[in-house]
Amino acid sequence: MFLPLHDGVPLKHLGAPVVTRGLIGANVAAFVLVALGALPIGEQWIVAGFGVVPAVLFGTEALPDGLPFVPAPLTLVTSLFLHGSALHLLGNMLFLWVFGDNVEDGMGHARFLLFYVVCGGLAGLSHAVMEPESTRPLIGASGAVAGVVAAYLILYPRVKVWGLFLGRIPLRLPAMWAIGFWILLQLVSAVAATDRNVGWFAHLGGLVAGAALTPVLRRRYDPELARLEATETPRSR
């Protein structure tokens, strides 16, 4: 396991990563509202009504009357803002916090938001294609975050990242090594199906989408920014 802690890369083009902060805020708000039971419907109905159900997405199965709450294709987006546990939320938001601001800086606000949503949608679609008959809802921002991770690796391969490896060992390594280890873990987990409760193919779909979209949506290549080292003084997030 790898958990990023800090990269130290200052923002060059933006005053503040408002989209990244807004996405984190929206995810946290959605989780709190569901967890506190502040909505007029129960958690299971929310997950079924806004999560991606592959069989429903492809029209081979139907949910009870009134579900899903939005057209099935739109669940590829709504599912990104739901999480099954506090740890699930914390892990995704930590990755988004560390890597999202710099990817947003490298793309701009509007293009980064488009990038995030498209990566998340394609991630959910990848999961559905691999498990087309599944009636279990898929929720979480992991696929979109995987796209952000892929973009960060492309934009800042030489930057060094502080992270916890195996959940307890603090190390500072080049992004290509740290993130490469994380990507390898996703691939092995998908092939070995180490945990059927995790949408591993959504993670891989997000990674592929992020790698494909980054060259299209990034700002003009900036070799100076690409060579930044984490020793530089970071701008406040």
Image (cartoon, rainbow, N blue to C red):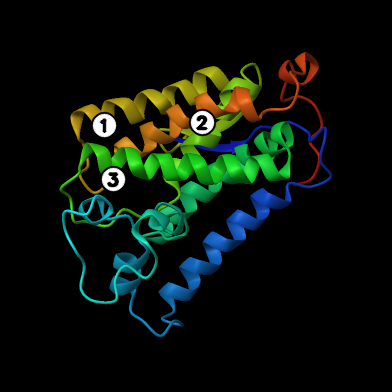
Residue shown at 79% from the left, 45% from the top: 236
Which sits earlier in the primary sequence, circle 1 or circle 2?
1
Rendered position, 45 above or below 220:
below
Q: Quadrant of residue 171?
A: top right
Residue shown at 73% from the left, 52% from the top: 18
Which sits earlier in the primary sequence, circle 3 or circle 2?
3
Identify the secondary structure beneath mark 1.
Answer: helix
Identify the secondary structure beneath mark 2.
Answer: helix
Looking at the rendered structure, which numbered label has been put on residue 190? 1
Picture coordinates of residue 145, whole percent (x, y): 50, 41
In space, the residues marked 1 and 2 are separated at their CA atoms by: 18 Å
Identify the secondary structure beneath mark 3.
Answer: loop
Q: Quadrant of residue 187?
A: top left
Picture coordinates of residue 217, whole percent (x, y): 65, 30
Which sits earlier in the primary sequence, circle 3 or circle 1?
1
Q: Nearer the viewer, mark 3 or mark 2?
A: 2
What's the residue type where badge 1 is placed? Ala
Quarter containing the N terminus: top left
Residue 148 as seen in the image, left or right of residue 41: right
Crowding at label 3, few (<14), some or many (≥20) Cα neighbours within 10 Å? some
Looking at the rendered structure, which numbered label has been put on residue 62? none
Crowding at label 1, few (<14), some or many (≥20) Cα neighbours within 10 Å? some
Which residue has dot 3 on it?
Answer: 198
In space, the residues marked 3 and 1 are separated at their CA atoms by: 9 Å
Picture coordinates of residue 30, whole percent (x, y): 50, 67
- Asked if residue 1 can be seen in this view, the reply is no
Toward the viewer: 35 or 120? 120
Which residue has dot 2 on it?
Answer: 210
Residue 53 as seen in the image, left or right of residue 85: left
